[in-house]
Image (cartoon, rainbow, N blue to C red):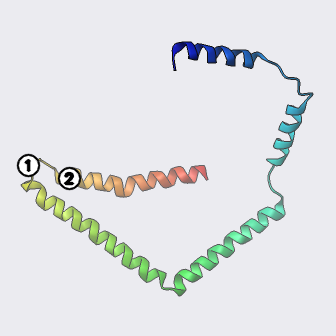
Amino acid sequence: MTDKDNIMIEDFFKQAAQQQIEDNGFTERVMAQIAEREKQPSAVIRHLSLLWTWFCVAVGLALFFIFGGWESLKASIMVLMSTVLTSLEVLITTAPTADFHLNPVVVLLAAAFVLIYLPYQTARKLSSVL
């Protein structure tokens, strides 16, 4: 678009923004209804929501233990730790043979930052939002 087109569009919207449309209190009535709908849910709804949440937690925990979730979780954690340690071991042993200089301490600090600090900060921010 050219500058002339931009100027014409700006003039059009300036004129449209200056128009006043009488709504006979319509906007105020709509805003009042919106404010009423945003009020807290009733005690019955909160109670049912809490019961549903605890029911789902109980069912989830029961299914977790019935289908051997603990063993699967332990195995997954062990595989993850083994993979991370093997990767760090390979990096530390091959770093001196590479053309670039890589300090193992820096690698371990970076890994600790990524594996510990970032999830901690993310969980902290999520808990403050929720």
Residue 98: x and y in percent read 9, 53
Q: Label 1: which residue?
A: 99
Identified by mark 2, the residue type is Val
Q: Label 1: how many residues lie within 10 Å, few (<14), some (14-19) or many (20+)?
A: few
Q: Label 2: which residue?
A: 105
Check contact, mark 2 vs mark 1: CB within 8 A: no
Q: CA distance from mark 2 to mark 1?
A: 18 Å
- The local secondary structure at tag 1 comes to loop
The residue drawn where x is 48% and y is 85% is 68
Residue 104 falls left or right of residue 11: left
Tell which of 109 and 3 is nearer to you.
3
Tell which of 69 and 23 is nearer to you.
23
The disc, 2 or 1, on the residue closer to the chain's N-terminal end is 1
The residue drawn where x is 56% and y is 54% is 127
Residue 21 falls left or right of residue 83: right
Tell me where residue 53 sits by quadrant.
Answer: bottom right
Residue 121 falls left or right of residue 40: left
Circle number at residue 40:
none
- The local secondary structure at tag 2 comes to helix
Residue furthest toward the right? 24
Q: Label 2: how many residues lie within 10 Å, few (<14), some (14-19) or many (20+)?
A: few
Residue 9: x and y in percent read 63, 18
In this rendering, which labeled residue sits more in front, label 2 or label 1? 1
The mark tally for this picture is 2
The residue drawn where x is 28% and y is 65% is 84
> Relative to 6, is 65 above or below?
below
> Relative to 21, is 103 above or below?
below
Identified by mark 1, the residue type is Asp
Residue 126: x and y in percent read 54, 52
The residue drawn where x is 68% and y is 17% is 12
Residue 29: x and y in percent read 89, 36
